[in-house]
Image (tube, rainbow, N blue to C red):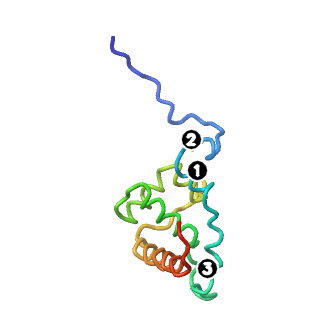
Amino acid sequence: MLSKHDSIQRDQLEMITLDQLVPPNHLVRKMEAAIDFTFIYDLVKDMYSELGRPSIDPVILVKLTFIQYTFGIRSMRKTIEEVETNIAYRWFLGYGFHDKVPPTPRSGKIMSDALKILTCLNRFSIAF
């Protein structure tokens, strides 16, 4: 017998947290639990100026690179598109439902900055 789901609940209002939507065994939870990314700030503080535009958080840059590599996403542009719609990625980056992700046109700059940070990490022989 053919069943048909008639009611569409897209406009249903619910009180739910981002944390509730990410399964407890999701890989991003395991990465977050295993790595304390705050050490990156001390390693890269000399790479940033006090003048100019605000930068993208260096931890976000590294985490974006982790997402790209771990989940086999082929480009930073596609990674950013995935972060816009994937709740688990947003959770891993510390973004809320309405936080803006780094803009796609800057993705080349983002990748360049991320590579500089990863090079800095490599220079200090920090293995992930």
User: Quick one: SS at disc 3?
Assistant: helix
Which residue shows up at 58% across the image and 69% down it? Answer: 59
Q: Are marks 1 and 2 in contact (CB under 8 Å)?
A: yes
Q: Position of residue 86 (x, y in %)?
A: 48, 50
| Disc 2: which residue | 23
Q: Nearer the viewer, residue 24 or 93?
A: 24
User: Quick one: SS at disc 2?
Assistant: loop
Can you tell which mark lies on residue 29?
A: 1
Residue type indicated by callout 1: Arg
Residue type indicated by callout 2: Pro
How far, Cα to Cα, is label 1 from label 2? 8 Å
User: Quick one: SS at disc 1?
Assistant: helix
Q: Position of residue 67 (x, y in %)?
A: 47, 59
Q: Nearer the viewer, residue 45 or 57?
A: 45
How far, Cα to Cα, is label 2 from label 3? 32 Å
Instruction: Count neighbours of disc 1 (C-alpha within 10 A) and say few if under 14, some if 14 to 19, many if 20 or more.
Output: some
Sequence-wise, the earlier of marks 3 and 1 is: 1
State whether residue 27 is above or below residue 60.
above
Which residue shows up at 48% across the image and 55% down it? Answer: 84
Q: Quadrant of residue 35?
A: bottom right
Instruction: Count neighbours of disc 2 (C-alpha within 10 A) and say few if under 14, some if 14 to 19, many if 20 or more.
Output: few
Which residue shows up at 53% across the image and 69% down it? Answer: 127
Q: Position of residue 115 (x, y in %)?
A: 45, 76
How far, Cα to Cα, is label 3 from label 1? 24 Å
Q: Quadrant of residue 43?
A: bottom right
Can you tell which mark lies on residue 43?
A: 3
State whether residue 106 is above or below residue 46.
above
State whether residue 25 is above or below residue 33.
above
Q: Position of residue 16 (x, y in %)?
A: 64, 40
Sequence-wise, the earlier of marks 1 and 2 is: 2
